[in-house]
Image (cartoon, grey):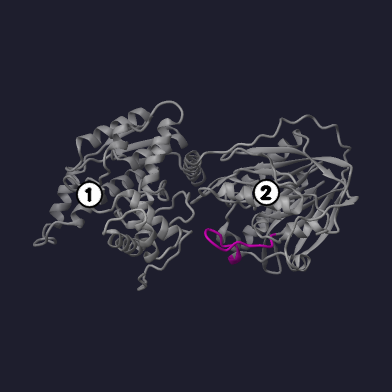
Amino acid sequence: MTSGTFNSISTTVIRVAAAQVNTTVGDIDGNSQLIEKWIKLAQLQQAELIAFPELTITGYPPEDLVLYDNFIEANKTALRHIATKVKDIVAVVGFVDSEDGKLFNSAAVLHQGKIVTTYRKIHLPNYGVFDERRYFTPGDECPVISIRGIKIGINICEDIWEPIGPSEVQRKAGAQIIINLNSSPYQLGKHRHREEIVSDLSRRNNIYTLYTNQIGGQDELVFDGGSMLFDPDGKLLGNSPRFEESLLVADIKAKLTEIPVPFRQNYTNFHEKLSQVGKSSTIEIPIIKPQKKLSNLPELSISHLGRLESVYHALIIGTRDYLKKTGFKKVIIAVSGGIDSALVTTIATDAIGAENVIGVALPSRYSSEGSITDARELCSRLNVELWTIPIEPGHVAFEGMLSDTFKGTEPGLSEENTQSRIRGNLMMSIANKFNWLVLSTGNKSEMATGYATLYGDMAGAYAVIKDVPKTLVYELSEHRNARGSGCPIPQEIIDKPPSAELRPDQLDEDSLPPYDQLDRIIHMYIEERLSPDLIIQKERKVRSDDNVETVVRRIVQLIDKNEYKRRQAPPGVKITGLAFGRDRRLPIASVWEH
């Protein structure tokens, strides 16, 4: 299908840059300084255009901060100030625009001290962790900027996830390059999906696409970067390393407008649908300073991270940035000698350094000598200081205080959980005394089924592995031992059966099915949102025993009835397709049963 747009036999080169930066929500001054710094770095590389991530000035996601008028005005004031610093380069910067009481997720095009034009995001995501329709109004214009005859379309994140969107409108208006600003959070497997989306966009529109993504942790979300450039055939030309700040700089040989080249679209009523997206306009950006001969750039590289390495990076950066962005320096972790606390302690050490991590062993009358020894060995290998505080005096005191109240009853869960709550109180007291943060150690399998104690092992400021299923905890532990020098997690910790050690000879599998089965059921119920009947059908293909239906229905019931616990759990890093917290919102008081 011919679009009416044109490309030519002759070409001209434009040098573009994608600034993959780590912004902080609400730090308008700090984010502005970051933008100015990276503009200077791009100019040193002779870039004519630099693109920043979505909502660069405010940080992403700003959530209800955008409902305050002084916040919006501060971000617009910062934009105007940044514009005055922009001279012989075009900078595309994300910010929140406002007009007539409406807010817009926007990108400003800055050049020679001015805001040349503004693009307002058209497709606003409102699923999973995204709430953009709560705050923003969709735009209806698809501007194209022209630099030395090279036409460039600007749009934002979700705009390229639509089969017919702003990119198509801009392509029809003659755009040869699409610049897409993103704040796309990490989850397992998502980076490959992004590559497929951008590749298809480039191929079907016969256009270059520069995709800029941010990096860093923000509360539960982690942004992994992976900014990338695709050619008109949908080929990946190069990408930025994930989970670190970087500048992707590339020369694009754009064709000038003489010979018509068709879209590679195959949609019924394509042009009619384009008119429903928005209208286009072209803004000329005069280049005042004569272009110097471009220096040679290093060859673009393509890098990919493996599954376990990407998860481990996400956990490190999520933990590191939560501490940094909340202003805390040190953490304490209850080190039990079990696999979960071992992994959390290792992640924390990798994230902020051993000197900023304190392990606390809290042995009880039921703690095995092996667990105490394993906790010591772990901290020794990590060079983490370990404090030991036996909880027996507190345990005896609680038993005495509750003896009359519990008289005539059989010991049970309450008595077991008293130990966990003593530990929680001690950990919070230490954190309170020294202004440190407690990292809790519960995993997704435990959070799902409620196999955790409120005001006990759930107490803390940040739950590093709350979205990591138990089976993945083991995989990550083995991976970390094989990663780099040394094996920080003793093999004894990995090999021994998991136990809460709240009563004699207790094992997790006394209360829960084997973790491989449990994690499959949790995945199907939480992430795939399958009904118990469908889960039973699928599980019978894996396990043929007669107990499958009973196990599935019991686990689903546990997940449902423990929503109240999860609402009171600390935030933690999201790594799966559907995490507890802002990803999954179910009522606590509900009579619905599957």
Please identify the residue farthest to the right as the structure is shown: 258
Looking at the rendered structure, which numbered label has been put on residue 199? 2
Give the mark nearest the N terminus, 2 or 1: 2
Question: What amino acid type should be assigned to the residue bearing mark 2?
Answer: Ser
Dominant secondary structure of the residues highlighted in magenta in the image: loop
Measuring from the top left, give residue 207's x and y in whole percent. 76, 49
Whether tag 2 and tag 1 are in contact, CB under 8 A, the answer is: no
For the residue carrying disc 1, how many other residues have a C-alpha within 10 Å: few (<14), some (14-19), or many (20+)?
Answer: many
The x and y percentages for residue 476 are 41, 39
Q: Position of residue 266 (x, y in %)?
A: 73, 60
The reply to whether the magenta stretch includes residue 320 is no
- Label 2 crowd (10 A; few <14 / some 14-19 / many >=20): many
| Residue annotated with mark 1 | 419
Residue 47: x percent and y percent?
Answer: 77, 38
Relative to 476, residue 201 above or below: below
594 with respect to 327 (left or right):
left
- Could you tell me how far apart the alpha carbons at marks 2 and 1 are, in whole angstroms? 55 Å
Of the two numbered discs 2 and 1 in the rendering, the one whose residue sits closer to the viewer: 2
Most extreme residue toward the top is 485
Which residue is pictured at 71% across the width and 69% down the height? 100
Q: Quadrant of residue 471?
A: top left
The quadrant where residue 102 appears = bottom right
- Badge 1 amino acid: Gln
Q: Farthest left residue?
A: 408
Side (left or right) of 130 relative to 293: left
Which segment did they paint magenta?
Answer: 121-134
